[in-house]
Image (spheres, rainbow, N blue to C red):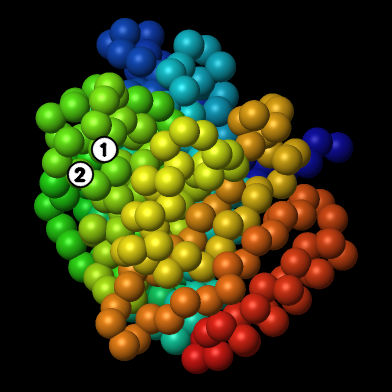
Amino acid sequence: MAQEETVMEKLFKTLDEKAKALNEENGQSFMENLGLAMENVYTEQRSLLEQATLQDRRKAFQFAYLNLMQKEDIQANHQITPDSIGMILGFLAARFLKNKEAFHIADIASGAGHLSASVHEVLSEHTMMHHLVEVDPVLSRVSVHLANFLEIPFDVYPQDAIMPLPFEDADVVIGDLPIGYYPLDDRSKEMELGFDEGHSFSHYLLIEQAISALKTSGYAFLVVPSDLFEGTNVKQLQNFIATETEMQAFLNLPSTLFKNEKARKSILILQKKETNVTKPVEVLLANIPDFKSPQQFQAFLQDLNAWMAENHPEN
């Protein structure tokens, strides 16, 4: 006997079929049409949507996105952050912000908004206002549709995240930082992490933007290359981090999430300095174990809790 479809499966199938049908009609990209399909479900198929939990909705979006992306060549920056990374980043944010009931959270270079959605799911007991900054017009439109579909508050700014930001004083900044060179040298030269010669690294400039968007004592949780602190320009980055922040942790994500060691990423946690409030800590350096190994993961949590008790007893 065939198993009955779950609500999430029904929702995924509805999004997938609608996006494909729209693609036949209008010839726009599958990604653009997935946004329109979410809007259609939100406005025309309320009874199905209202049966679905936040997790059902987000997973249906993730599966539809991944399925549709197999049908067209996509740029690297159009890939969504896997929910496994979003969940661990959300968990870490929850651990550092245990006593904060409400906060503003900014996501720089936010893509389709999936990282923010995954983090929101973990932090759903907190009251949050999300500010998303994404330069790609298709991705920023998809994130607006995703916010409606999930019924969570996203304020989406369709602009280059390295240009001056339209907000400041975020309590938290998150980001899965795109890697590469930033082409606008005039802007780079205005920034502390811009290089004197040639194009600057986008991910360096986004780290600087993350810190400038934070209020003092606020935290940044950033997905960065695991080899961030290697290479010829690293002194400039290290000096900036030491001057402007208290570095908290550098946590290598499980290698099983990446095609090879070169592609591996880590989570960098920084706290913006505040005179007489923030203090230096012993930086937590660790490998986050594979989520499929509960015992190893439990050991990691014990180490994290011991580190928090010593360095942030208030949390």
Q: Note whether 173 is above or below 4 in the view shown.
A: below
Q: Note whether 244 is above or below 126 in the view shown.
A: above
From the viewer's side, name the closer residue of 1 and 204: 204
Residue at image x 28%, y 33%? 195
CA neighbours of label 1 inside 10 A, class few (<14), some (14 to 19), many (20+) = many
Please state which amino acid type lies under the numbered disc 2: Met
Residue at image x 15%, y 58%? 167
Q: Note whether 174 is above or below 80 in the view shown.
A: below
Figure quadrant of residue 102: bottom left
- Which residue is disc 2 drawn over? 191
Residue 272 pos. (x, y %): 34, 68
Mark 2 and mark 1 in contact? Answer it, CB < 8 Å.
yes
Residue 307 pos. (x, y %): 65, 78
Q: Which mark is residue 194?
A: 1
Residue 213 pos. (x, y %): 24, 59
Residue at image x 60%, y 80%? 308
User: Does residue 83 appear in the picture of this structure?
Assistant: no
Q: CA distance from mark 2 to mark 1?
A: 5 Å
From the viewer's side, name the closer residue of 124 and 219: 219
